[in-house]
Image (tube, rainbow, N blue to C red):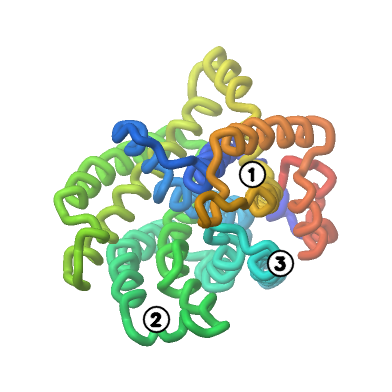
Amino acid sequence: MTVDAQRMPRRVDGVDAARGLALIGMFVAHVSPAVATPEVAELIAIADERPRLLFALTAGIGLGLMTGGARPMIADRSELRRQIAVRAVILIALGMLIWVTLDPLVFIILDVYGVAFLVLLPLLFLPPRGALALGIGLLAVSPALAELGARTDFVAAVRLTPLKFLSDWVVGGAYPVVVWVAVMLIGLAMARMDLQSPRVVGYTALAGTAAASVFLPLAAQLPAPELVSEAGWSVPLRASLEALGNVGVGALVVAAMLTLTALARPAVRRVASTALSPIIAMGGMPLSIYTIHLVVIALAIREEDGVATDDSWPLLVGLVVGSMVFAWLWRRYLGRGPLERLLRWASGRDRTDPVAAAPRRDA
């Protein structure tokens, strides 16, 4: 590959830390038991939406870093797009394989992740402001459109067929592509604007705080979807407002992690990087950690009062602690995650990247 490849930034610990937090949030959403205390229930409910949007945001940042960060690649763009397309197809196949063989009691993210990558291929090298404007514009309308589409008779009919995964990809699932692409475009724009710049990180924190402070309170004034008997305007409006606010929370988390691990004073950076190192390690191998957690929760399915469940506090603690320990040890002694290695090899990146031998140089 040309000299452009050598400009590609190393893994960014702050982004990996944010991605690791998103994974932990998903664990909470997937297996935390119901609780009787309303305050604890509200705390756990934070994990219902924000982790997956934070994950999508960091996925967009990862694509931006992979394609050159603030100095996007000029040469070999077609080869890079081919590599990303191969990764996308593998992710789709892996997601479908897990769905067919394990059928865990959660929505699976991998196939939708792959579809979103394919949709983003022609948009990878948009100017930063263009990508940001397009992402925000789509995010303002796509959750509402997905909510409206999910309530149509056509989607309901599709969901009764073996092709129900197609409706889940587009509008009907917990991870509709039309929403994910918007969020990933915002992440892509963040990477293009240079995440090493204190000014960019500061603006990101301000924008995220403003979005969360404005849109989430507005959404809270509307009735919850389960309280609305018919498909009215409040449900799609609430979906868009919540998405805008929750992506704002995600942007604030990314900015905070970048500040702690890269922009704070050296003493603070050392302490934060050490304390966050297990979470950073998790975020550095998201495919491996996410896939392993699906296998674990599929094996943990049991029946209680005639209802299948995988909820368990011991399982939640085991997933969080076990993932941290596994990721930290693997990263320390073996480098890149196991499935990340396979994905990189299968896409041909090891054969074209002159720094492939350095385990932390791939975004």
| Image quadrant occupied by the N terminus | bottom right
Q: Nearer the viewer, residue 99 or 304?
A: 304
Question: Spatial distance from mark 3 to mark 2, Cα to Cα?
Answer: 24 Å
Type of amino acid under label 2? Ala
Q: Mark 3 or mark 1, which is nearer the start of the sequence?
A: 1
Circle 2 residues within 10 Å: few <14, some 14–19, many ≥20 = some
Question: Spatial distance from mark 1 to mark 2, Cα to Cα?
Answer: 45 Å
User: Which residue is under mark 2?
Assistant: 156
x and y, in percent, of residue 124 in the image: 54, 65
Which residue is depicted at the point 22% across and 49% down? 215
Q: Mark 2 or mark 3, which is nearer the start of the sequence?
A: 3
User: Does dot 3 land on a helix, a strand or a loop?
Assistant: helix
User: Does dot 2 land on a helix, a strand or a loop?
Assistant: helix
Describe residue 298's horizontal placement relative to residue 107 as left or right: right
Residue at the front extreme of this rendering: 305
Circle 1 residues within 10 Å: few <14, some 14–19, many ≥20 = some
User: Which residue is under mark 1?
Assistant: 9
x and y, in percent, of residue 208 in the image: 33, 42
**What label does residue 101 carry, if any?**
3
Question: Spatial distance from mark 1 to mark 3, Cα to Cα?
Answer: 38 Å
x and y, in percent, of residue 226 in the image: 26, 60
